Image (cartoon, rainbow, N blue to C red):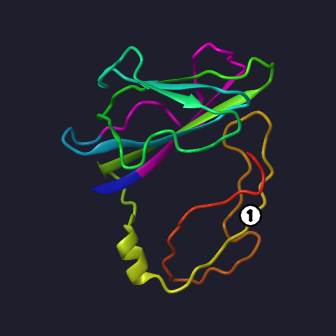
């Protein structure tokens, strides 16, 4: 069986100070995937992008506190990790998360949130994940890739492009590690 990372993304429109359930992006659901009951599943990180300050609340019947769960303060236009480094929230197979967000009361303002979930043993998946020492031992060169995405103003997953669309510099039959990304405008 395989390791997996999954990003769950959703949004609310003008929720004001009311904690409002996320509308999930196409293909994303807040049900934790079915995995062996004894396998490790963790919420590694959460982020939110708000027009004004608000709160991101994550809860489930299996968390310590199902009433308030994790309440994380979100600063306006500050997309930063909301959970402390190396502190993870255990999750459980087929658990149903409830994720809510508050923020701007201005009509049309979209507030977004994303959760990063790690599965140690997800049937049917075989992600090739490595740690930093393995990366450093095998790295030969650093390569940057540039993409230009035309995004929608309605939220959700939009604006896609192949990694090689702008500059096709990747070499066939070569392993590459995706280390991260930078953007030149607030998304």
* Residue 122 visible in this rendered orientation of the protein: no
Which residue is pictured at 29% across the width and 34% down the height?
Answer: 92
In this orientation, which residue lies closer to the viewer: 50 or 164?
50
Element class at badge 1 = loop
Which residue is pictured at 62% across the width and 61% down the height?
Answer: 181
Which residue is pictured at 38% across the width and 35% down the height?
Answer: 32
In this orientation, which residue lies closer to the viewer: 146 or 73?
73
Query: Toward which corner of the image does residue 11 lie, by quadrant?
Result: top right
Stretch of the chain drawn in magenta? 5-34
The residue lying furthest to the bottom in this view is 140
Residue 95, horizontal then vertical, whole percent: 34, 28
In the picture, the quarter occupied by the C terminus is: top right
Residue 169 drawn above or below residue 73 = below
Residue 125, horizontal then vertical, whole percent: 37, 54
In this orientation, which residue lies closer to the viewer: 136 or 37?
136
Tally the numbered discs. Answer: 1
User: Circle 1 is placed at which residue position?
Assistant: 147
Residue 177, horizontal then vertical, whole percent: 50, 71
Query: Toward which corner of the image does residue 59 lie, by quadrant?
Result: top left
* Residue 138 visible in this rendered orientation of the protein: yes
Residue 41, horizontal then vertical, whole percent: 31, 43
The reply to whether the magenta stretch includes residue 142 is no
Residue 83 drawn above or below residue 164 = above
The residue lying furthest to the left in this view is 38
In the picture, the quarter occupied by the N terminus is: bottom left
Residue 134 drawn above or below residue 185 = below
Which residue is pictured at 39% across the width and 64% down the height?
Answer: 129
């Amino acid at each position: 069986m395989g390791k997996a990372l999954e990003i769950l993304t959703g949004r609310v429109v003008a929720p004001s100070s009311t904690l409002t359930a996320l509308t999930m992006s196409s293909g994303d659901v807040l049900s934790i995937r079915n995995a062996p009951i004894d396998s490790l599943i963790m919420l590694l990180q959460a982020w939110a992008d708000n027009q004004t300050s608000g709160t991101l609340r994550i809860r489930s019947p299996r968390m310590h506190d199902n009433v308030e769960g994790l309440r994380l303060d979100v600063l306006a236009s500050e997309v930063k990790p909301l959970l402390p480094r190396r502190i993870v929230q255990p999750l459980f197979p087929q658990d149903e998360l409830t994720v809510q967000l508050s923020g701007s009361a201005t009509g049309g303002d979209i507030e977004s949130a994303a959760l990063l979930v790690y599965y140690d043993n997800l049937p049917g998946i075989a992600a090739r994940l490595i740690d930093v020492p393995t990366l450093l031992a095998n790295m030969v060169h650093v390569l940057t890739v540039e993409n230009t995405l035309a995004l929608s103003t309605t939220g959700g997953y939009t604006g896609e492009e192949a990694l090689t669309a702008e500059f096709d510099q990747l070499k066939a039959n070569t392993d590459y590690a995706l280390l991260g990304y930078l953007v030149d405008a607030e998304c």
